[in-house]
Amino acid sequence: MERGSMNLANAPEVNSTTNGSVATYKSLPEDNSNWDTKNENQAQKMGKTDEVEIDDGAKEKMLNDPTSADPIARTAEIILISENGDAKITVKSANDVLCGMGKEELMKYANDPFWVRLRWVMFIGFWILWFAMLFGAIAIIVFAPKCSAPIPKKWWEKSPIIQIDSSDLEGKDIKGVEALFDTIKGKHVQTIALSSILKGTSGHVEDFKVIKREIGDMQFMKDVIAAAKQRDQRIVLEVDPNHSSINHPWFNRSVNREEPYTNYYVWADGKNAADGTRQPPNNWLSVYGGSAWAWHQVRGQYYLHQLNKTQPDFNFENPSVINEFVEIFQFWLSQGISGFRLGSTQYLTEDPHRLDEKRSSFPAEPEEYQYLNHVYTQNRQENVKILKLWREKIANITKDDELFTLQDDVGADTLAILNENQRLIDLPQKSQFLSTADAEIPAEILIHEVTEWISRTNVSWPGWDVNGKERSLRQRMPINVADSITLMTLLLPGTPIFKLNDTLSAPTAFAALAAKRNEETFLYGDFKAHVINGTVFAYTRDGLKGGHPGYLVAYQSSRENASIDVSSLSAMPSEVSILTHSPNYVQDGQSIPTKLSSDNIPMAPKSTVVLTFVPES
């Protein structure tokens, strides 16, 4: 026997019933008068009409009851039984199915005060929650910890500084100066330091507010400063406040004990030796050898000169002298000067008790400066107080937009005192290894001195002076080697300081690298130094995200040709491109390809090459 069952509430329309198939149900129309006739005919077709048993009450209830008025719909199940070719239909009792409330019942509750309040509570609650989520998202964006933006670099940290000596200006009218500034600007130089332009001979200033007659008058100086500003260039003045010329009016008045100049310089009585001869007050030595004291017959006393005999030291124990230089700095700022490079500041003050200095451990003759340990005459903490006062006075005028730096190297211990609580000295220098180097300076010295100074806590952004105060770079080595040193220095972290001639031998290469200094890679990127093959000093500049290129600068310190492999350096790809190079990088007229394999880069003797690459992740 076969059975089929169907749910009348959900069953589709019946198409046929054969061989025990499950029947389906379709709702009848309101006029169902033909139902019995059709049912009888169907039963006759099946064979036995008297065996069809239908519950008439269930049928009427099923067809006529308005289920839409009752949330509980009742369904009936028809069971079709096939026996020996005959079919038998039975209807099982109805099941209750939840089908929801009708429209009239829903409307009854729609205006019920309880449900109205509930709907309003839910509506208001939804929007409160929505706005809370919105404000929460905004708060997360605003107050979430972020990577702090780097501190913007100052104007003197971007451009190289070019020293222009008085000889570079002598004989030029303002048109000539403008042409010179245009040439410098074409090399992407925005900072110019005027050196030795004050009245007097080099280092022997006779008036700190007047320029040399060979250059011009103060109106000419104002025109020079204006010409620079028209080209977005800054003028910095180099001043030695430690001493003046022996011909300075202040010194002549001090010799004659004219007030208030009597104690503007360091004067002291001499000592009498056992044989009755006159001796200097103590054993202090001049930087250039011999006693730091000179006898003045008119005054009848010794005056101190830690440098040349014709450069008497000022007495900075006297507040009037300190204030004189405050006025000097203010005067030049009023003319349009943007800052100062101060010289010989390590000698500003001396021990007021004039105590003898002790023997140093350095092997030297008794008359040589290195023979003594200069604790009473050099780098005293009292110097810091003077420099700090000057800086504060200058900053009150410029709003901390001035360059305040030193021409001389400063030791790490002294710098720790100078920049302990705030930046007092910009561009701190320790570049004697460059300013005294000859053509044979090895790669090991370069990497040691550069990395040691950069790593100092109080250095931040150093200055690299390749010339110093004595013999210039191009006086100490061949021009082609000087060009290589210049290009090698240009992209170091810090600000390089050159003379005008350093920009002229390789103008295209110099301009290309000076322009690069404004890129974020060189202002904020990483610096890593290496010695390759024992003779090549190389460093990379990269470390920024977002498509910034990397750079590699390599200087061959040897006089031999070489090939270096840099493929193992961090983020180095297999191929690099040549950005620029020193003139002596090209040997015997050979052509240099624009791209090189990073594991085979040729290096000519004493040459510099600058490569660029796309860092690998």
Image (cartoon, rainbow, N blue to C red):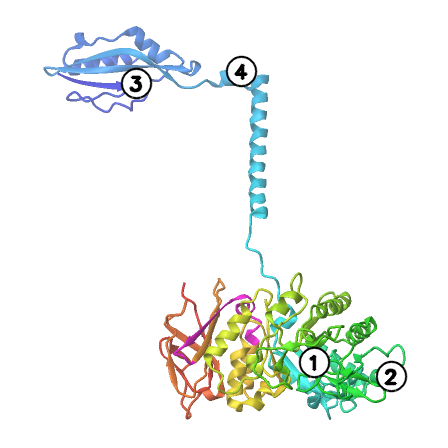
Q: Comparing marks 4 and 1, which lies closer to the viewer?
A: 1
x then y, percent, for residue 379: 67, 72
Q: Secondary structure at mark 1?
A: loop
Q: Are there few (<14), some (14-19), or many (20+) residues within 10 Å of tag 3?
A: some
Q: Earlier in the sequence, mark 4 or mark 2?
A: 4
Vertical position of residue 573 compared to residue 478: above or below: above
Q: Residue at x 27, y 7 (%)?
A: 55
The answer for how far apart the CA atoms under marks 3 and 2 are is: 128 Å
Q: Residue at x 47, y 73 (%)?
A: 539
What amino acid type is highlighted by mark number 2?
A: Arg
Residue carrying label 1: 284
Q: Residue furthest left?
A: 84
x then y, percent, for residue 448: 49, 74
The answer for how far apart the CA atoms under marks 4 and 1 are is: 112 Å
The answer for how far apart the CA atoms under marks 1 and 3 are is: 122 Å
Residue carrying label 2: 253
Tell me if residue 232 can be seen.
no
